Amino acid sequence: MAGHNSLLVPRASLMSFQFDPYPKMIEKPKWYWRTLSCVPYLLPLHEAIYMAENSFHLAPLLGEYNELLTQSFMDTIALVPSWFFMVYFCAVSLFLIRRRELPHFFRFHVLMALLLDNVLQIICTSCNWFPVFFFKGNRLLIHFWTGVALAYIFTVLECMRCALYGAYADVPSVADAAYIHTTPEFFR
Protein backbone atom coordinates (compact mmCIF):
# COMPACT_ATOMS: atom_id res chain seq x y z
CA MET A 1 0.00 0.00 0.00
CA ALA A 2 3.02 2.28 0.47
CA GLY A 3 3.80 2.41 -3.26
CA HIS A 4 0.18 2.76 -4.35
CA ASN A 5 -0.69 6.16 -5.82
CA SER A 6 -4.31 7.04 -5.42
CA LEU A 7 -6.21 8.31 -8.41
CA LEU A 8 -8.56 10.22 -6.15
CA VAL A 9 -7.43 13.80 -5.94
CA PRO A 10 -9.12 15.99 -3.37
CA ARG A 11 -11.09 18.74 -5.07
CA ALA A 12 -13.30 21.57 -4.05
CA SER A 13 -16.97 20.98 -4.42
CA LEU A 14 -18.30 21.35 -7.93
CA MET A 15 -21.60 22.62 -6.62
CA SER A 16 -21.84 26.34 -7.06
CA PHE A 17 -23.76 28.31 -4.49
CA GLN A 18 -25.96 31.09 -5.78
CA PHE A 19 -26.56 33.31 -2.80
CA ASP A 20 -29.12 36.00 -3.47
CA PRO A 21 -29.56 37.60 -0.07
CA TYR A 22 -32.55 39.83 -0.73
CA PRO A 23 -36.04 38.77 -1.66
CA LYS A 24 -37.17 39.57 -5.17
CA MET A 25 -39.13 42.77 -5.36
CA ILE A 26 -42.14 42.46 -7.61
CA GLU A 27 -43.01 46.13 -7.16
CA LYS A 28 -41.57 49.05 -5.29
CA PRO A 29 -42.75 49.46 -1.71
CA LYS A 30 -45.39 52.12 -1.14
CA TRP A 31 -44.13 55.65 -0.59
CA TYR A 32 -45.03 55.63 3.11
CA TRP A 33 -42.99 52.45 3.78
CA ARG A 34 -40.03 54.00 2.00
CA THR A 35 -40.35 57.20 4.02
CA LEU A 36 -40.80 55.33 7.30
CA SER A 37 -37.71 53.26 6.47
CA CYS A 38 -35.62 56.45 6.49
CA VAL A 39 -36.70 57.60 9.95
CA PRO A 40 -34.54 55.14 11.97
CA TYR A 41 -31.45 56.30 10.07
CA LEU A 42 -31.77 59.77 11.60
CA LEU A 43 -30.38 58.64 14.96
CA PRO A 44 -27.06 57.25 13.64
CA LEU A 45 -26.79 60.13 11.17
CA HIS A 46 -27.18 62.82 13.81
CA GLU A 47 -24.91 61.04 16.26
CA ALA A 48 -22.25 60.65 13.57
CA ILE A 49 -22.43 64.29 12.58
CA TYR A 50 -22.29 65.40 16.20
CA MET A 51 -19.34 63.09 16.90
CA ALA A 52 -17.53 64.15 13.74
CA GLU A 53 -18.03 67.82 14.37
CA ASN A 54 -16.87 67.73 17.97
CA SER A 55 -14.21 65.05 17.86
CA PHE A 56 -12.73 65.32 14.42
CA HIS A 57 -12.98 69.06 13.72
CA LEU A 58 -15.37 68.85 10.81
CA ALA A 59 -17.23 72.07 11.67
CA PRO A 60 -16.00 73.92 8.54
CA LEU A 61 -17.14 71.04 6.31
CA LEU A 62 -20.53 70.57 7.95
CA GLY A 63 -21.44 74.26 8.00
CA GLU A 64 -24.72 75.32 9.56
CA TYR A 65 -26.19 71.81 9.58
CA ASN A 66 -25.03 71.27 13.15
CA GLU A 67 -26.74 74.41 14.39
CA LEU A 68 -30.03 73.75 12.67
CA LEU A 69 -30.64 70.06 13.18
CA THR A 70 -28.01 68.26 15.20
CA GLN A 71 -27.75 70.51 18.22
CA SER A 72 -31.49 70.49 19.02
CA PHE A 73 -31.65 66.74 18.40
CA MET A 74 -28.64 66.06 20.65
CA ASP A 75 -30.02 68.35 23.36
CA THR A 76 -33.19 66.27 23.34
CA ILE A 77 -31.20 63.03 23.42
CA ALA A 78 -29.25 64.35 26.43
CA LEU A 79 -32.50 64.59 28.40
CA VAL A 80 -33.28 60.87 28.21
CA PRO A 81 -31.79 58.53 30.80
CA SER A 82 -28.74 56.45 29.94
CA TRP A 83 -30.69 53.16 29.92
CA PHE A 84 -33.14 54.47 27.29
CA PHE A 85 -31.10 53.30 24.29
CA MET A 86 -30.89 49.76 25.62
CA VAL A 87 -34.67 49.70 26.06
CA TYR A 88 -35.09 51.35 22.63
CA PHE A 89 -32.99 48.67 20.95
CA CYS A 90 -34.81 45.80 22.69
CA ALA A 91 -38.26 47.29 22.06
CA VAL A 92 -37.61 47.89 18.39
CA SER A 93 -36.13 44.41 18.02
CA LEU A 94 -39.07 42.71 19.69
CA PHE A 95 -41.99 44.81 18.45
CA LEU A 96 -40.96 45.92 14.96
CA ILE A 97 -38.34 43.60 13.53
CA ARG A 98 -40.01 40.34 14.64
CA ARG A 99 -43.46 41.24 13.29
CA ARG A 100 -44.08 39.34 10.08
CA GLU A 101 -47.07 41.54 9.28
CA LEU A 102 -44.75 44.43 8.45
CA PRO A 103 -43.02 44.42 5.07
CA HIS A 104 -39.57 42.85 4.94
CA PHE A 105 -38.24 46.02 3.33
CA PHE A 106 -39.21 48.14 6.33
CA ARG A 107 -37.94 45.66 8.92
CA PHE A 108 -34.65 45.32 7.03
CA HIS A 109 -34.00 49.06 7.04
CA VAL A 110 -34.96 49.46 10.70
CA LEU A 111 -32.49 46.76 11.67
CA MET A 112 -29.82 48.25 9.38
CA ALA A 113 -30.19 51.56 11.21
CA LEU A 114 -29.89 49.85 14.59
CA LEU A 115 -26.81 47.92 13.51
CA LEU A 116 -25.16 51.02 12.05
CA ASP A 117 -25.85 52.82 15.32
CA ASN A 118 -24.19 49.94 17.16
CA VAL A 119 -21.16 50.22 14.88
CA LEU A 120 -20.92 53.91 15.75
CA GLN A 121 -21.16 53.15 19.46
CA ILE A 122 -18.35 50.61 19.11
CA ILE A 123 -16.20 53.16 17.29
CA CYS A 124 -16.86 55.81 19.96
CA THR A 125 -16.16 53.41 22.81
CA SER A 126 -12.94 52.19 21.24
CA CYS A 127 -11.84 55.79 20.67
CA ASN A 128 -12.26 56.49 24.38
CA TRP A 129 -9.73 53.78 25.18
CA PHE A 130 -7.00 55.44 23.14
CA PRO A 131 -4.61 57.85 24.86
CA VAL A 132 -5.20 61.56 24.28
CA PHE A 133 -2.07 62.00 22.16
CA PHE A 134 -3.78 60.03 19.37
CA PHE A 135 -6.08 62.98 18.83
CA LYS A 136 -4.17 66.04 19.99
CA GLY A 137 -0.73 65.89 18.46
CA ASN A 138 -0.79 63.40 15.65
CA ARG A 139 -2.03 64.97 12.41
CA LEU A 140 -2.05 61.63 10.60
CA LEU A 141 -4.53 60.12 13.06
CA ILE A 142 -6.69 63.23 12.96
CA HIS A 143 -6.98 62.81 9.20
CA PHE A 144 -7.61 59.08 9.61
CA TRP A 145 -10.49 59.62 12.05
CA THR A 146 -11.88 62.39 9.86
CA GLY A 147 -11.97 59.91 6.98
CA VAL A 148 -13.66 57.31 9.19
CA ALA A 149 -16.30 59.83 10.26
CA LEU A 150 -16.99 60.97 6.70
CA ALA A 151 -17.16 57.38 5.45
CA TYR A 152 -19.68 56.56 8.18
CA ILE A 153 -21.81 59.62 7.40
CA PHE A 154 -21.81 58.81 3.68
CA THR A 155 -22.69 55.18 4.43
CA VAL A 156 -25.75 56.23 6.43
CA LEU A 157 -26.74 58.70 3.71
CA GLU A 158 -26.43 55.96 1.09
CA CYS A 159 -28.66 53.68 3.18
CA MET A 160 -31.23 56.48 3.41
CA ARG A 161 -31.04 56.97 -0.37
CA CYS A 162 -31.61 53.25 -0.93
CA ALA A 163 -34.58 53.30 1.42
CA LEU A 164 -36.14 56.26 -0.38
CA TYR A 165 -35.52 54.64 -3.74
CA GLY A 166 -37.12 51.40 -2.58
CA ALA A 167 -34.02 49.21 -2.68
CA TYR A 168 -32.06 47.22 -0.14
CA ALA A 169 -28.85 48.85 1.07
CA ASP A 170 -25.82 46.65 0.58
CA VAL A 171 -23.33 47.47 3.33
CA PRO A 172 -20.92 44.54 3.74
CA SER A 173 -21.53 42.39 6.84
CA VAL A 174 -24.17 44.76 8.25
CA ALA A 175 -26.64 44.06 5.45
CA ASP A 176 -26.05 40.32 5.77
CA ALA A 177 -26.76 40.45 9.50
CA ALA A 178 -29.88 42.55 8.91
CA TYR A 179 -31.15 40.13 6.29
CA ILE A 180 -30.52 37.07 8.43
CA HIS A 181 -32.39 38.54 11.38
CA THR A 182 -35.38 39.64 9.32
CA THR A 183 -36.03 36.44 7.37
CA PRO A 184 -38.88 34.20 8.49
CA GLU A 185 -36.58 31.17 8.72
CA PHE A 186 -34.68 32.87 11.52
CA PHE A 187 -37.81 33.14 13.69
CA ARG A 188 -38.40 29.41 13.93
Image (spheres, rainbow, N blue to C red):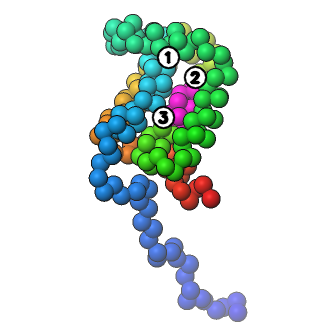
Q: Which numbered disc, 3 or 1, marks the residue that appears first in the sequence?
A: 1
Q: Are marks 2 and 1 in contact (CB under 8 Å)?
A: yes
Disc sitting over residue 124 in the figure? 2
- Residue visible at 61% across and 34% down? 91
Q: Name the residue beneath numbered marker 1.
A: 51
In the foreground, 185 or 96: 96
Q: Which residues are magenta?
A: 112-123
Position above or below: 112 against 85:
below
Q: Are marks 3 and 2 in contact (CB under 8 Å)?
A: no
Q: Which numbered disc, 2 or 1, marks the residue that appears first in the sequence?
A: 1
- Residue visible at 68% across and 22% down? 83
- Residue visible at 64% across and 23% down? 84
Q: Secondary structure at mark 3?
A: helix
Q: Let me know if residue 119 is in the magenta part.
A: yes
The three-letter code of the residue at mark 1 reads: Met
Q: Let me know if residue 150 is in the magenta part.
A: no
Q: CA distance from mark 2 to mark 1?
A: 8 Å
Q: CA distance from mark 3 to mark 2?
A: 17 Å
Query: Which quarter of the rendered picture does the N terminus lie within?
Result: bottom right
Local crowd at mark 3 within 10 Å, few (<14), some, or many (≥20)?
Answer: many
- Residue visible at 43% across and 25% down? 42
Query: Which quarter of the rendered picture does the C terminus lie within?
Result: bottom right
Counting from the top left corner in percent of width and height, residue 92 is at 57, 36
Residue lying furthest right in this view? 1
Counting from the top left corner in percent of width and height, residue 112 is at 48, 39
